[in-house]
Image (cartoon, helix red, strand yellow):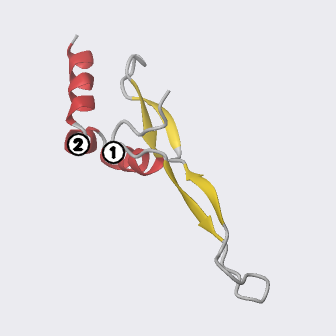
Amino acid sequence: MARRCDICLKKVVHGHRKKHKHSKGWKYRAPKTKRVWVPNLRDVKLDAKGELTVKMCMGCYRRYRKEGEAFLKRKNKKVYKKLLTLESS
C-alpha cells in the first residue's frame, strides 16, 4: 500500500541529511547521508458501518475531528462523494 494521505495527498519525501561540522577534520565538504520523511498516517473509518476506510495524516485527522464532513467536502471531493453514496444506500 502506498504511504500517502488520501485527503491532502501528502506522501513520502526523500532527501539528504547534511552533517555540518566546522573543524579541521572536515576539510572538503559536508558528508551527506540519505534519509526519508514519512507522513504520520492513520486508518480512519468515515461511516458508521465501517465500509469506507481512509488513510489520513494527523493534520487532516485533527481538522476532520474539529470540522467534520465540511472539511472533507472542501479538501477532497472524491472522498466526500464516496461517503455520500454509502450513506444514501
Residue in the image at 22% along x and 10% along y: 89
Q: What whole-number distance in Å separates the C-alpha atoms at marks 1 and 2? A: 14 Å
User: Which of 3/44 is in front?
Assistant: 3
Residue at 57% in and 51% down: 36
Helix, strand or loop status at disc 2? helix
User: Quick one: 33 or 2, which is closer to the camera?
Assistant: 33
Residue 59 position within the rendered picture, expressed as x and y whole percent measured from the top left = 42, 51
User: Which residue does the numbered mark 2 point to in the structure image?
Assistant: 70
Residue 69, quarter of picture = top left
Q: Relative to residue 76, is residue 17 drawn left or right?
A: right
Q: Amino acid at mark 2?
A: Ala
Q: Which mark is residue 8?
A: 1
Q: Is residue 26 left or right of residue 34?
A: right
**Vertical side of 49 occupied by 39: above or below:** below
- Compared across the picture, whether 87 is left or right of 32 comes to left
Which of the two residues, 47 or 28, is positioned nearer the viewer here? 28
Q: Earlier in the sequence, mark 1 or mark 2?
A: 1
- Comparing marks 1 and 2, which lies closer to the viewer? 1
Q: Residue furthest front?
A: 28
Label 1 sits on what residue type? Cys
Q: Is residue 65 above or below residue 89?
A: below
